[in-house]
Amino acid sequence: DGLIICGYQYPDMLFSELAANIPDYFDMLVIASRVHYEACRESGITCLPMPLRTQDFINTVSLTVENILWERKKRKTKQKVIKAAKLKLMDDNGFDEQGAHRYLQKKSMDNGINIVEMAYMILEHTALF
């Protein structure tokens, strides 16, 4: 997870090219001149106009970091739930870890729900599965 703070343009690329090459779990904050600010905003990436106001910068970075931490916590919680469901399937049904994961995936696809929801269902109602 991380935050990349960058300008609008570099000698070899625009911010949008950089954004296309970073992992999904990174956020980007672009600092752009007023001339390029609208183009940056339309891209859906967080940006601030120049000249930069210190308080706007601090607030934006703080909110972005809070969001990054929240998303990380959510991801870890999802991973823990999936792991717990796999362990339950392994204990109750004699699956190995790979088999339990495949079972969990198949059940979630069959029921049209995401794997985390299925994991919660397995943990709550193991007798049904």
Image (cartoon, rainbow, N blue to C red):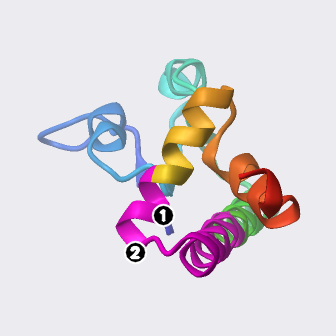
Is residue 119 depicted above or below 76 in this figure?
Answer: above
Residue 96 has which mark? Answer: 2
Q: Residue at x 75, y 48 (%)?
A: 117
Question: Would you say residue 29 is visible in this rendering?
Answer: no
Is residue 114 depicted above or below 22 in this figure?
Answer: above
Residue 58 percent across, percent down from the top left: 75, 67
112 on left or right of 105: right
Which one is nearer the viewer's eye here, 110 or 60? 110
- Where disc 2 sits, the SS reads loop
Q: Is 118 colored magenta in this rendering? A: no
Q: Is 84 colored magenta in this rendering? A: yes
| Mark 1 and mark 2 residues within 8 Å of each other at the beta carbon | yes
- Where disc 1 sits, the SS reads helix
Give the amino acid type for the residue marked by disc 2 in the picture: Asp
Residue 100 has which mark? Answer: 1
Residue 39 percent across, percent down from the top left: 50, 18
Q: Within the image, what quadrant is residue 47 found in?
A: top right
Residue 20 percent across, percent down from the top left: 31, 37
Q: Tell me where the magenta segment starts and ends, as one range.
A: 75-102
Is residue 15 depicted above or below 84 in this figure?
Answer: above
Q: Within the image, what quadrant is residue 55 found in?
A: bottom right
Q: Residue at x 70, y 57 (%)?
A: 119
Q: Residues within 10 Å of mark 1 (few under 14, many from 20)?
A: many
> Mostly what secondary structure, the magenta segment?
helix
